[in-house]
Amino acid sequence: MALIGNKEYFKGIGEIKYEGKDSDNPLAYKYYNPEQVVAGKTMREHFKFAVAYWHTFCGQGADPFGPGTQNFPWDQPSDAVAAAKEKADAAFEFITKMGFDYFCFHDFDLIQEASTFAESEKRLATIVDYIKGKQSESGVKLLWGTANCFSNPRYMNGASTNPDFNVLARAGGQIKLALDATMALDGENYVFWGGREGYMSLLNTNIKKELDHMGRFLGMARDYARAQGFKGNFFIEPKPMEPMKHQYDFDSATVAGFLHQYGLQDDFKLNLEFNHATLANHTMQHEMEVAASHGMLGSLDANRGDYQNGWDTDQFPNNITEVTEAMITFLKAGGLQGGGINFDAKIRRNSTDMDDVFHAHIGGVDIFARGLLVADKIISSSQYDALREKRYSSFDSGKGKDFEDGKLDFTDLYQIAKDNGELELQSGKQELFENIINQYI
Ligand SMILES: [Mn+2]
């Protein structure tokens, strides 16, 4: 593997390769074999693994109780452009050593925001140009770009849902630049995460007005990008709370309804995150099933929450049951629409060695590979599908089929109920289903 850039940031670590499940090498894949075909596609094609620029190259482990613990060598230069270029060098070294094809970013992950809009625009153009060069050297692609319209204090009351029109317009200007950056880097998709699109108190909030504004704003962003020739998907990333008490993009079902209400359903799909599903009191599989049922299963943010506390811990995924169940839905939905698996996950604050981020991503990749292999076996060789189909077999013929075909009216149901008399109970067989998952893991 040719080393891109002048410095090596992750010294002593080479390209991560597949060695199989009996390998004891911690810096090797045990299950992820990129060229292995599973259910008709290679693992590389199924997953489109991506590194999240913000957690892996920006987040240093600060929490409300103390500063960051990870001192990144690429943050040394005091000049913003020089620091951003070093960060890009480190990022592309890491991405290529992992063997990933993709990365994802927020605008101001790439380079520090300046004190004026005009200077920020210039900085972004400079770093986008530099990253374009890194992409053509390495072949690394952009899965999606996005804009950070939630960290700067100006967005404390929201971006497109801000009660102040001038803040909404500022968000529009910023997102135009983020869309331009995404298109310049041949981004395959663009994500909207409404970090502060919601409310802290209903006493000072007009929900209807804010939702109307958000719907119009997203339509304007879409129209702008389409007019520039952008062919990719737009994704909304649901999350129920944090930082706001209540966020408008609560979960898959809420967002699907919103997209239909504002005429956005043909261009927008969902980017679903495991930890956000947990916060919404759903499982990830639930969120994926709902999205798939709307034809909106776009992309996944891979991580996990903490099952004992109620906030967004963004830990690396390692729960085989959770990921296997998600992969069953993934395969049955025919995969993702345009997206991939982005590791929106961060190492813990006390993980301070340069190799920790490798262990984290290797574990995440392997849990998905293993989950996919298990899910494929469950679907292709177990009685899982047949058992599910059997539960609905009364709709395959007779009056059940007539119902599905729209041939019955409500009085027909009355007559059938009367003729049937009391019914035999039909078991849901839940424990049997659970055992099948466990058997194949
Ligand atoms: Mn999260």
Image: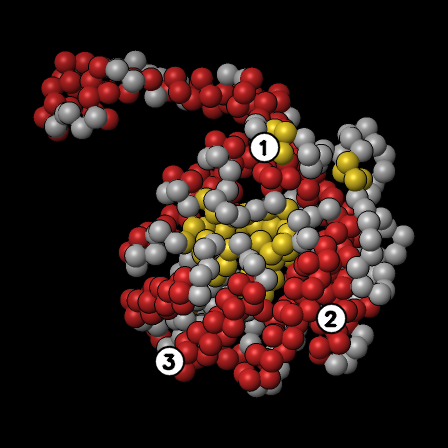
Q: Nearer the viewer, residue 8 or 392?
A: 8
Q: Residue furthest right?
A: 12
Residue identifier under label 1: 41
Residue identifier under label 2: 85
Q: Earlier in the sequence, mark 2 or mark 3?
A: 2
Q: Is residue 25 above or below residue 22?
A: below
Q: Could you say which quadrant of the image residue 130 lies in?
A: bottom right
Q: Is residue 51 above or below residue 173?
A: above
Is the shortest distance between ligand 1 and the CB of mark 3 under 8 Å? no
Residue at image location 64% in from the left, 39% down from the top: 44
Q: Amino acid at mark 3?
A: Phe
Q: CA distance from mark 2 to mark 1?
A: 36 Å
Residue at image location 54% in from the left, 79% down from the top: 153
Q: CA distance from mark 2 to mark 3?
A: 35 Å
SS assignment at label 3: helix
Q: Is residue 198 visible?
A: no
Residue at image location 57% in from the left, 50% down from the top: 301
- Disc nearest the viewer among 2 and 3: 2
Q: Amino acid at mark 2?
A: Lys
Relative horizontal placement of residue 137, taking residue 14 as reference (left or right): left
Q: CA distance from mark 1 to mark 3?
A: 47 Å
Where residue 165 is drawn, which disc sits there?
A: 3
Relative horizontal placement of residue 13, taking residue 370 as reference (left or right): right
- Point out the image quarter for the C terminus: top right
Q: Is residue 49 above or below residue 112?
A: above
Q: Earlier in the sequence, mark 2 or mark 1?
A: 1
